[in-house]
Amino acid sequence: MAGIGFELKKIFANQGVTHAVRGTLYAAMATIGPILLVVVGFVVLFFISGLQHAHLYQRDVLMAIILYTFIFSLVLTLPLSAVLSRYIADCIYEDRLEDVLSGYYAGLLLNMGVALLTCVPFLAAAVYWGSLPHLDALLAGMFFLAMVFLFYNMPFISALKEYRRIALAFVAGMGISVGLSYILVVLVAMRLVPGILLGIGVGFGLTAWLLYLLARNFFKTKRRKYTLFWQYLRRYKWILLGNAFYVLGLYVHNFVFWVAPPANEGAANLSVTVAQIFHMAPMYDVATFLAMLTSVPAMVIFVVRTEINFHEKYQEYCHQLTGGVGHDLEAAKKRMFSTLVQGMLFIGKAQLLVSFILYLVLLYLAPILHLGGFVLTLYPLLAAGFFVVYLMYFMVIFLHYFSDEAGVAWVTGTFFSIVLLVSVLCVVFSVPPIFYGAGLFAGAFAGWTLAFFRLKYIEKHLNHIIFGR
């Protein structure tokens, strides 16, 4: 996020309400703008599916494919993207821009290779052991690869600083997705699943391709040193592992409820199977999605208020390392960690207020959005869980500042393990539905607690850690 931070500091350097609003909107577009565009686009797409009056089974298949595509493309891409971000940052810092594209292509080959090795067998099973038509499976695979390509390009957003063009790429992609889907499903009367899959596959593929062209245009020179990125994968295996634990922890509670049996005899089954291959828990998945969106504003608050201020104090501390005296170094360290604490407290208070307001809005909109009481029962604890997840994630970012990659892996590994364990216990002991999100909350709280004490240890021994290295 460094590129975003540099641009924001230029904006906020000018005083006044106009610059404050501009900076906030800039941060929102850079951090959550693509997410909001995707959400709006899919709301429109499901409205289009209603225009065709398609059978409920077709809508379930479409929802299952989209759900699986988003979750597993993130699971496959996010760990590798974390190492790629480190590689790009080091190349920029060391003025080795000619090495960026070679690392890009090496990572892309690995990411797309793993994606093919996972999606092809699954879709083949969906066709031959499930009931998914061949065309639907082919288009689902195309959509999955497009999303992997898109998520792989995301680390370049911060490096490029071409936020207007990036926003236009997402707008163009969503426009193509919605427009082409409408033409195929409503005007051409194509079957719902292949019509929308073709539309969104082309649209997201276009967005990914435009982001790639921006990256290739920015990093024009290229040296054929593809082994550099492979060396980074070996060197920063803790970053790879830590981000794998994090993204799995975000969704492993969903996986548990996808295959969970009914809580007791005669109770409604939360889990459903679509096309004999896709396991889902639609009500739990919808509640999870809404809860995740509730805490998204915390990311904007973090970028606007906390990370920028902390980065300035971090730079002051690093400056004292090279030319300051002992008491100046200690004072700089105290200011840095004081800024960290104040920023986290501000995020917590602001996000609590935002979450409360959004919960009231959701209660008002629930009848309009046809959200059942069961979803609203699941939502509060899941929303609290994602609130703590984001707080934990911000602590993890600070651990990265101090190059504590092993600590990050321990934090996210604890998060993943506790989420899985408590979610399984919720199913085994048939807890009331209001506590179904206990796994996410418990795992996030455990991860946040470990990150807190890890940062306290770093604060106490920071000078020794820095000079020891």
Image (cartoon, rainbow, N blue to C red):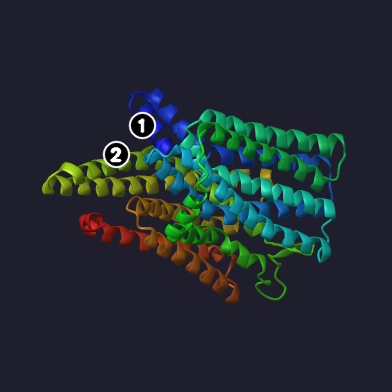
Give the residue displayed 65% in from the left and 70% down from the top.
260
Q: Residues within 10 Å of mark 2 (few under 14, many from 20)?
A: some
Measured as percent of width and height from the top left, residue 99 is found at: 47, 42
Which quadrant of the figure contains the N terminus?
top left
| Amino acid carrying mark 1 in the image | Lys
Q: Quadrant of residue 36?
A: top right
Describe the element under mark 1 as helix, strand or loop: helix
Q: Is residue 287 above or below residue 146?
A: below
Describe the element under mark 2 as helix, strand or loop: helix
| Residue toward you, 216 or 293 | 216
Q: Which mark is residue 9?
A: 1
| Amino acid carrying mark 2 in the image | Glu
User: Pointers 1 and 2 in contact (CB under 8 A)?
Assistant: yes
Residue extending furthest toward the front: 224
Q: Which mark is residue 312?
A: 2
Q: Is residue 201 above or below residue 405?
A: above
Relative placement, left or right, of 188 versus 178 is right
Relative placement, left or right, of 94 versus 226 is left
Q: Is residue 3 above or below residue 397?
A: above
Give the residue displayed 76% in from the left and 45% down from the top.
197
Tally of numbered tags:
2
Q: Quadrant of residue 176?
A: top right
Question: Is residue 274 visible from the viewing direction of this image?
Answer: yes
Measured as percent of width and height from the top left, residue 91 is found at: 42, 42
| Cα gap from disc 1 to disc 2, whole angstroms | 10 Å
Measured as percent of width and height from the top left, residue 148 is found at: 63, 49
Measured as percent of width and height from the top left, residue 303 is found at: 41, 40
Which quadrant of the figure contains the C terminus?
bottom left
Q: Which mark is residue 46?
A: none
